[in-house]
Image (cartoon, helix red, strand yellow):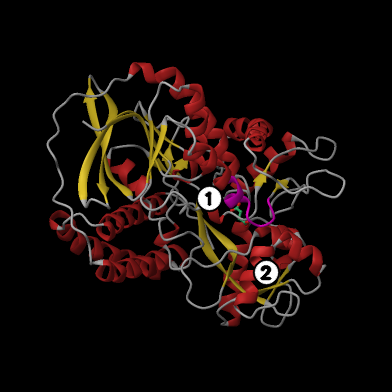
Amino acid sequence: MLKTDILIIGSGISGLFFAMKTAKKRPDLSIVIMTKETAKNTNTRLAQGGIAVVTNLFKDSFEQHIKDTLQAGDGHCDETIVKMVIEQAPERLKELIEIGASFDKDEDGQWNLGLEGGHSQNRILHHKDSSGLEIEEKLLKIIKKMPNIEIWENHQVIDLNTETKKGKTTCTGAFYYDKKHNKIKYIRTRTTLLCTGGCGQLFENTTNPKIATGDGIAMAARAGVEIEDMQYIQFHPTALSAGKDNPLFLISEAVRGFGAYIVNEDQKRFLFKYDLRGELATRDIISEAISNEIKYQSKKHVYLDCRHLDQKAFYAHFPVITAHCNSLGIKPERDLIPIVPAAHYQCGGIKVDPNGKTSIENLYAIGECARTGLHGKNRLASNSLLEALVFAHQASEDVNKTIAKFTFSTKLLIPKFPKAHQSNDYYAFDILKKELQTLLTTFYTSSERDAELAFAKIKMLNNSAISLIETHEITIPFIEFSNMLATALLIIKQCKTKEKQTC
Ligand code: SIN
């Protein structure tokens, strides 16, 4: 019988940080990290900006960071959570530094703190423009040496298994597809964590990698877990609009913090019409302004103008962005950079308490898939890596205290899935995925009439997919498409009952 004390689904910053902390505290517990591709293929890895932490108490304060977060969240944040996360930030940062994660300093040895939209102070610690990669690599390096952690790559979780006794539901394990051996298997667990990231791939334009298909949300919803605020999808204002890349390459918010302008086809700045902070307004405001300008000028994009900036300093801070632009023949010192808003972050998700616990006793959700109450309607830039660290810590403390209550279930399982199939149906599902992306983007970003039409078409897509879902063999494209469809329907449902984000 396959079993592990703790199963972590996903290998981004939240899962890895939780694993590291828990494994150190509890060498007696076995931990498996399951990931559907390679451990390195995560959204964390693409994070450019950095981590927002109050480090300079002369210029900055927790109160100011709290105020900025609440303002960005537009009245929809949970203030207790905001306070908890921001006040814990320095301790979590210290732990990252202890494992060797490095953040840029000035010549005088002080943190080189970046500025991003919605922040009233420079408070973003960064590793050039590849902060996520730096953290992910340091975490993976240390985790690979820990004897009680195993990383299972190419293992796609299909569904959670739950048992309900005396009105209490617990998660007793997970069914998964072992890609290498082309088999569906089951693993028993005492505690399970969903660290599956977001759902940017549900939209036509996104900065999220192909793996961001809403798997954790769909699985949690099928298990009966409460999902909240899925109507708040954050669009990043500055994704590079060149070619047909999926995902679109992100041009970090930090570039605007560094002084870049956003200009229209006439090379005119236009953001002050929308917000006095101009380029440093929050993402929701800038994305909406850009979308309006694009419509108004009947163009495909607007531009980021970096030509007036100190180019040596720009290159030192943004080597990855500069190299990527150069590879497309765009020279930031000479050319305008075409940009569009793109789906970037899911502010809502699996509803959790301050310890990352879901409505199921021994099931946790941390990282982007969770709705903690930190972000409200619109996440403040560079608060997401921070949230992942803080909630990984909270969950680790809680699991340490509570895991003794949970034993492995011995209930006999009746396999509920058809057999696995080494798929060659990528092409068919790619077409369905593209159709869903187009329809959901229309639903999310268009006028009421077009949105209703798109919704009607998604319902038709769902109806035809239901029979497919019931009879299809288990393949990776099939699992991902089913999860995408389920997550899209949740977004639509929550948009219809609550106010959606605008962009
Ligand atoms: C960015 O660098 O603009 C992305 C950082 C974030 O999503 O907070």
- In the rendered image, residue 17 lying in the magenta stretch gets the answer no
How crowded pointer 2 is (Cα within 10 Å; few <14, some 14-19, many 20+) is rated as some
Looking at the rendered structure, the secondary structure element under dot 2 is helix
Residue at numbered disc 2: 322
Judge left or right: residue 6 versus residue 410.
right
On the image, the x and y values in percent for residue 88 come to: 64, 30
* 410 to 252, vertically: above or below: above
Q: Quadrant of the C terminus?
A: bottom right
Looking at the rendered structure, the secondary structure element under dot 1 is helix
Name the residue located 49 percent from the left edge and 42 percent from the top edge. 367
* Residue toward you, 332 or 97: 97
Name the residue located 65 percent from the left edge and 55 percent from the top edge. 282
Q: Of all residues shown, which one is farthest toward the right?
A: 108
Please tell me the numbered disc located at residue 131.
none
Judge left or right: residue 51 versus residue 362.
right
Name the residue located 56 percent from the left edge and 44 percent from the top edge. 375
Judge left or right: residue 138 versus residue 399.
right
Q: Say which label, 2 or 1, has the lower sequence index.
A: 1
On the image, the x and y values in percent for residue 148 come to: 42, 29
The amino acid type of the residue labelled 2 equals Thr
* 302 to 485, vertically: above or below: below
Q: Quadrant of the N terminus?
A: top left
Q: Quadrant of residue 9?
A: top left
How crowded pointer 1 is (Cα within 10 Å; few <14, some 14-19, many 20+) is rated as many
Residue at numbered disc 1: 44
On the image, the x and y values in percent for residue 405 come to: 34, 16
The amino acid type of the residue labelled 1 equals Thr
> Which range of residues does the magenta coloring cover?
127-135
Judge left or right: residue 391 versus residue 85.
left
Number of marks in the image? 2
* 160 to 333, vertically: above or below: above
On the image, the x and y values in percent for residue 466 come to: 18, 57
